Image: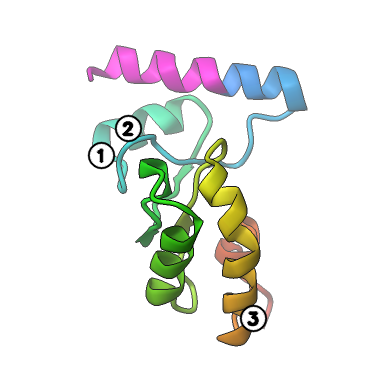
Amino acid sequence: MDAATAYREISTCADRIRALTGSPGRWFRPSQTQYASALLKEQAARAGYPTCLSYSLDSRDHTDPGPDAVARTVLAGVRPGSVVSLHCGHEGTTAALPVILDGLRAKGLRPVTAGDLFTPTAA
């Protein structure tokens, strides 16, 4: 993907999110890749996203392996500070969430927002 195409896709989505919510949001995470390339980071910044998010744990839920497999994958790999990739619109993901949340609690972990995870707190 060239820079113009990347910018157009990112800015079009930002405009749509802004129209629906009043804000484009604080974070950009590129689709279909774990890490943003330099080109994507550059174009995201140009579109108003100074920070690109990545994930550290791929649940593989987009392959629709079923809720048990999604929950097993997440709970086997999650660590403090993990960023887990989960997708909307997949039945298995929705069904796996209660099991994942219970499993996180059993490990002494809890889900937090990206803002909570990445915003420094005063010492």
Q: Quadrant of the C terminus?
A: bottom right
Q: CA distance from mark 3 to mark 1?
A: 34 Å
Asked whether residue 32 is in view, the answer is yes
Which mark's residue is nearer the viewer, 2 or 3? 3
Residue under the point 68% across and 23% down: 18
Q: Is the residue marked by circle 3 packed among few (<14), some (14-19), or many (20+) residues within 10 Å? A: few
Amino acid under label 1?
Answer: Ser
Mark 2, secondary structure of its residue? helix
Q: Circles 2 and 1: CB distance less than 8 Å?
A: yes
Question: Can you say which quadrant of the picture contains the N terminus?
Answer: top left
Span colored in magenta: 1-13
- Asked where in the image residue 91 lies, by quadrant, the reply is top right
In the depicted structure, whether residue 107 falls above or below residue 60: below
Give the crowd class for mark 2: few <14, some 14-19, many >=20 residues within 10 Å.
many
Where does label 1 land, which residue? Answer: 37
Q: Quadrant of residue 122?
A: bottom right
Q: Which residue is mark 2?
A: 40
Q: Residue at x 60, y 42 (%)?
A: 26
**Left or right: 4 with respect to 62?**
left
Vertical placement of residue 30 versus 78, above or below: above
